[in-house]
Structures are given as C-alpha cells and as structure tokens.
Amino acid sequence: MLTVLFATRDRAVLLRKVLEAFCRLRPPPSGWKLVVVDNGSRDGTAEAIASFKDRLPLQSIFEPAAGKNLALNTGLQLLEGDLTVLTDDDVFPHPDWLVELRRAADAQRDFSIFAGAILPRWEVPPPDWVKWTDPGPVYTLTDPTRPEGPLAPAMVFGPNMALRSGIFQSGIRFDPTMGPRGGSYPMGSETELVLRLARQGHSAWYAPAAVVEHFIRAEQLRKDWVLRRAIRYGRGKYRLACNPEAREASAQVPRRRFLVKKIAKEGLIIAAASVSARSERVFQARWRLNYWRGQLAEARILGRISRNHR
C-alpha cells in the first residue's frame, strides 16, 4: 500500500486535467490511495476534487492557512501504507508511474528516498532562449540521460519523489518556512527535507522509469518570470546554507560582503555583454545577478529575524 500526497490552491481547471491523468494510472500490486490537500482555495477546487471521488481512491482535507509545506504537513495525518509518494498539482503522471516507484522501493531495501524522471509538458512551444536556462532550478526538470542508481539528495525534486512512510511516522515534517506560500519565498522545501534526511543517514535512489510530466505554463516562458525565479532560488540556497540540519557538505554561509561583490561582478558582465550584443551572456548574467540578490535578501531577512529574537 502506498499513498500519493499533494497540495493544491486555486487551480481547479488544471487540477481536473491532472486528476484525469491519475485515472489512467496502473495500480501498484499492493494498492494505493490519493490524498489531496485543498490549501485554502477560493475557486472551484473543492468541487473538482469531489467530482473524482467515485473514480479514484481519493481522500481530501482542507488547510486554510496558506503554505504548501504547511498543507502537506496537514495531509500527512491521512497516510496509509509503507510508501509516501509526493508530487504537485501541475504534474501529469505516466500510466506506470506508481508501479515503477513501487518496484524501486521493493527492490532497493537499503534506500528510503526515491526519485523519478520529470519531463516538460509545455503549454505553448518554448522560445529558443529557454535552452540558455538550467532546467533543474528553473522548471524542476530532470536530466533525461541520467541512469538508474544512487542519487545525490539535492537532485531529488518535489514533483516526483517518494519516501518510506516510516520517516513521517517517526515525526519528521516539512519545514513550513520554506516553499510556496504566496508572493516571494525561499525555494527548496523538498530539498531541505531530503538533505535533512541525508544527514540522518537516509540514501536516495533514482528510478528513471517512473515518469511524470511537469506542466510549464505560458507565463513561465517569459524572461521576467525566470529572473524572478532566480531570486527565489537564491533565497532558498542561502536558507539551506544557514540550516545545520539540511546543509550540503560543501556549503558555507556566504558573508554579505561576498554577496555584494558577486552582484557587482555580474553587473559588470551584463554591461560588457550588452555592448557586444551577446544576448545569451546577458541573460545568464542577469540570472546569476538575481540569484545573488536573492541570497543577499534572505541574509537580511534572517538577520532581522535573529535580531527580533534576541
């Protein structure tokens, strides 16, 4: 038995399409259930969920306080079985998705974290400049050439991951200060959890046959959206570096002076590349500039929090 868990907020139209894809899943041998947490939606989300309860092994719960991780923590109370599969409300699974995750979990008894492949499902054809981006942090996509085997914890992505349920039964929870909760936020909520688990001795396994498609909205194919994403990514990286329980082995907390120098350096690169009309270099420098700006912003936010708690 396994449980699939995800949170949703104000995406009723897309959610119906996602749940239609869930109806085409092959059930794993031990059975499964789906838990959907309605995170304070004000559109037709409740009606969309209810319309699938006679077609899916679906159970829902309402969490009014905004925050994806807070909603997931609420949904954990409905878990059943020995494996918890995590995904998002904009993810379309391939029919064998759960069968393949179940196979990997049963075959790899020494591993407790599992990740599958994440492919793009573009709402509209992507512009040429998308190839200048890193698909991991920008669109949460995986490397299609990665072979099956052990995986670095930081490469486990939220749209397609599974954990042995005993982890949550032991009291482990998501960090509600990270991840989507409206407006700007530090990215990396699932990364924080997996890195924390890695520090406790848990290992990750990659199962490329467990495939989902991540829906990439038309608005996400605008440069301004991607550059805002860089700020959230930078904020998350700084937050993780400050967390001793979820810090990557080589990570260090950057000093503010270092961040200011990085921002200045990227500004000079942008100016030089603009003069030579090198669009790709300008865009990538702008991404790095916003990434460092995000780190600096998070340093200031955490500094204020620290002072207020003295």
Image: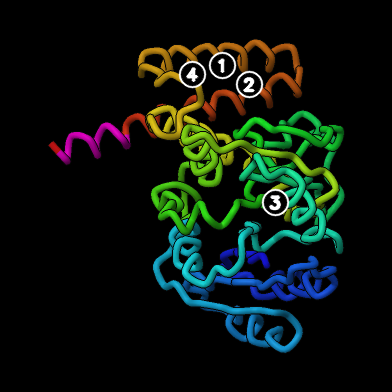
Which numbered disc, 2 or 3, marks the residue that appears first in the sequence?
Answer: 3
Question: Where in the figure is residue 102, as x and y percent of width and height?
Answer: 75, 56
The dot on residue 263 is 4
What amino acid type should be assigned to the residue bearing mark 2? Ala
Q: Mark 1 points at which residue?
A: 266
Q: Give the range drawn in magenta.
A: 301-309
The residues tagged by marks 1 and 2 sit, at their Cα atoms, a distance apart of 6 Å
The residues tagged by marks 3 and 1 sit, at their Cα atoms, a distance apart of 34 Å
- Point out the frontmost of discs 2 and 3: 3
Residue 50 falls in which quadrant of the image? bottom right
Q: Mark 3 points at which residue?
A: 160
Label 2 CA crowd tier, 10 Å (few <14, some 14–19, many 20+): many
- Of the pair 82 and 45, the residue shown nearer to us: 82
What amino acid type should be assigned to the residue bearing mark 3? Asn
Question: Where in the figure is residue 236, as x and y percent of width and height?
Answer: 48, 37
Q: Name the residue under label 2.
A: 285
Circle 3: element type: loop
Question: Where in the figure is residue 84, as x and y percent of width and height?
Answer: 61, 59
Which numbered disc, 3 or 1, marks the residue that appears first in the sequence?
Answer: 3
